[in-house]
Structure formats: C-alpha cells, structure tokens
Amino acid sequence: MELLMDDNESDKHKHFNYDKIVEQQNLSKKKRKKLVKSNTPLEEDDFQVDVQDPRFQAMFTSHLYNLDPCDPGYKKTKATQSILEEKQRRREERQHSQEVAALKSRAVQEKDKAETPSSSTEALDPSLSLLIKSIKNKTEQFQARKKQKTK
C-alpha cells in the first residue's frame, strides 16, 4: 500500500501525453511566449525511436508503413522526423551500394573483353572473309597504281 501512495516512485516512470506534445510543438511564436511567461511548463518530447531495432525494419522496407506528411492525421514530432531521416539515409546508402556494384560489374565485363581474343574473325562466314580479302587486295593495288602515277 505504501508503494502505491509514494509519489516519488511515480516520477521514475514518466508518462507523456502525445496530444499535448504535438499541440505545443505546433503553437505559434506568440502563444509559445505566452505560455513561457505564465510559467506553464511546456511538455518536452523526450520519446526516442530506436531506428536500429530489428523489430521495426518493416518501416524502412515495406511500402505499407510509409509516413505521409500530407495526411491529415500526420503529426510532426521528433520521432517521426528521425524515422523519415533514417529512411532517407538508408535509401541513399542502398542507392550508393547499387552504383558501386554496377561500376564493379562494368569493370569486370571490360576486363573480360580485353582478355579474350577477338573471335569475330573466326565466326565470320567464309564467303564474307573472302570478300573482305578481295577488297583489301584491290585497295592495295589501287594505292600502288596511284603511287606509280605520281612518280
């Protein structure tokens, strides 16, 4: 019975009123000054979201848990800001890792192309290779005749 009546114990477990916190955060400057002058204590938003907790990973990966700041039920608090910032940080991190992976794969492909000999001449049709040879021979003959005329 003594524990129930002891007020000091209730201070350990500080409870907060979400509606009051949001209301006080959204007060205009004039109203906030009035409250401060009247010595009415403003309720502080001490609530912290553990964004590294694996139980909340769906918030960052699933579209079902997106926060919509345009929604009329959305309340801007420090906790929602930290969630949005963490989601943005993870998105940028994921995008950066994808870019790095793409650059690595391109480098590997270019390295493979440089190491393997060109098999394009081996894969040509024999009639096509004969055509190429004849064109080369005719151009060489033409160049040789041209040199003789200029001498």
Image (tube, grey):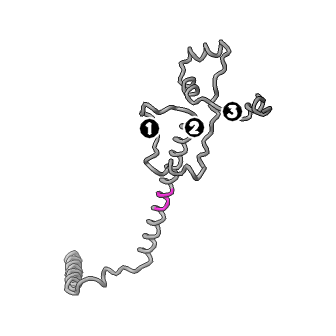
Work out how far the residue at label 3 is from the one at label 1, CA to CA, in angstroms: 29 Å
Q: Label 3 is placed on what type of residue?
A: Lys
Q: Which mark is residue 79?
A: 2
Farthest-out residue, right = 2
Residue under label 1, please give it: 68
Q: Residue at x 46, y 72 (%)?
A: 111
Q: Label 1 is placed on what type of residue?
A: Asp
Q: Is residue 132 above or below residue 23?
A: below
Query: Mark 1 or mark 2: which comes first in sequence?
Result: 1
Query: Where residue 28 sits: x, y (%)?
Result: 53, 18
Query: Mark 3 or mark 1: which comes first in sequence?
Result: 3
Work out how far the residue at label 3 is from the one at label 2, CA to CA, in angstroms: 17 Å
Does residue 5 appear to the left or right of 104 in the view shown? right
The span shown in magenta is: 97-101
Query: Mark 3 or mark 2: which comes first in sequence?
Result: 3
Q: Residues within 10 Å of mark 1 (few under 14, many from 20)?
A: few
Could you say which quadrant of the image residue 34 lies in? top right
Residue under label 3, please give it: 14
Query: Where residue 96 sits: x, y (%)?
Result: 50, 54
Q: Residue at x 30, y 82 (%)?
A: 121
Q: Residue at x 65, y 32 (%)?
A: 15
Query: For the residue labelled by badge 2, is the local secondary structure a helix, a strand or a loop?
Result: helix
